[in-house]
Image (tube, grey):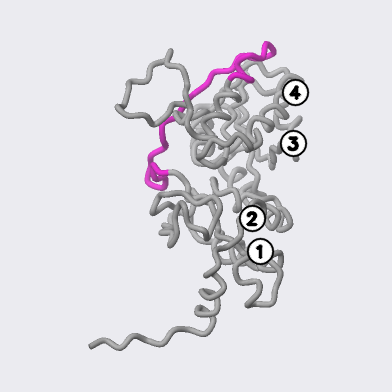
Amino acid sequence: MKEEREKIAILGCGWLGLPLAKSLLSKGYEVKGSTTSESKLEVLKNAGISPFQIQLEEHQVIGTIEDFLKETDVLVIDIPPGLRREISSTQEMTFVNKIKTLIPFIEKSGIQKVIFVSSTSVYSDGFPIVEIREETKPNPDTESGKQLVIAETLLQSNSHFKTTVIRLGGLLGDDRHPIKFLGDVGRPDLAQKAADMTQEQLAAMLYESLMNKIMPLPNEVMVYPAHGAGSACGKNMMKETMDSLGHQKEMNYALNQPSKEAFIEAVLDGLLPPPAYFPMNVAMNKRGIAPLMMC
């Protein structure tokens, strides 16, 4: 009698999820994998992974989540929080709410084993550096770390299934750099007066540029941002000075919106008024600057 293969579902076939799925397939497991991108379904299928397009939101799950979880022995949850670094008392529990929304589906499916991919960001970046042990209590100093701790507790306290938490300290590889994402695509509201266009129209143009010119580029392309954390040119920019485009595709909130309308809403939400000198900068950019005469 042929032994039945164990079935594993990986929610989030990104930097870790995809190579993990391929490794499990090579060891004889039957693997289902999810992605939020329709274009990536073919990538999963060609790798031998049963593909599902699943979008986990705060109050609903878009996609056939029941079929994804059906007859599954082990569920691996590998979805990044995608939050800003700073802990804010006013920031909503976006990632936590997504996990809360997912849990009833896990309960209903009858899955007994869950692996939750967390992060060492649940520990603060204090100095001097201390040794982290299994019994070390989390003390996050970032918003993502804070919500990861809550998500870990929600899953591990559920009596319907057993959850194992894995806290990763960084993913290394030829196509993966051990740095955080840059986090934004700039703000589309700065040139609206000079261009006689609304910020919504400019955001739509930004979306088309990103989807048609940037997203098709290879993941190996390196990004060297002209602005960093603290700049008024964005609301969610990170301090790092380089990153791979592939990492940005996975982690950048603006590049992971399900539609143009959702993108416009996301990039315009929470924008602070631009500095007073910005209109002058726009005008200078449009007319050009006289070349400097070198002595």
Amino acid type at mark 2? Val
The residue identified by callout 4 is 104
Residue positioned 37% across, 29% down in the render = 126
Residue 97 is covered by the magenta coloring:
no
The residue identified by callout 3 is 61
Counting residues from the N terminus, which is met first, the one under dot 2 or under dot 4?
Answer: 4
Tag on residue 203? 1
* 52 and 26: which is toward the camera: 52
Amino acid type at mark 4? Pro
The residue identified by callout 2 is 267
**In the rendered image, the vertical position of residue 207 relative to residue 15, given as above or below:** below
Disc 3 and disc 1: Cα gap in Å?
Answer: 26 Å
* 46 and 59: which is toward the camera: 59
| Relative image position of residue 204 (x, y in whole percent) | 68, 65
Residue positioned 41% across, 87% down in the render = 290
Disc 1 and disc 4: Cα gap in Å?
Answer: 36 Å
| Relative image position of residue 280 (x, y in whole percent) | 53, 76
Counting residues from the N terminus, which is met first, the one under dot 1 or under dot 2?
Answer: 1
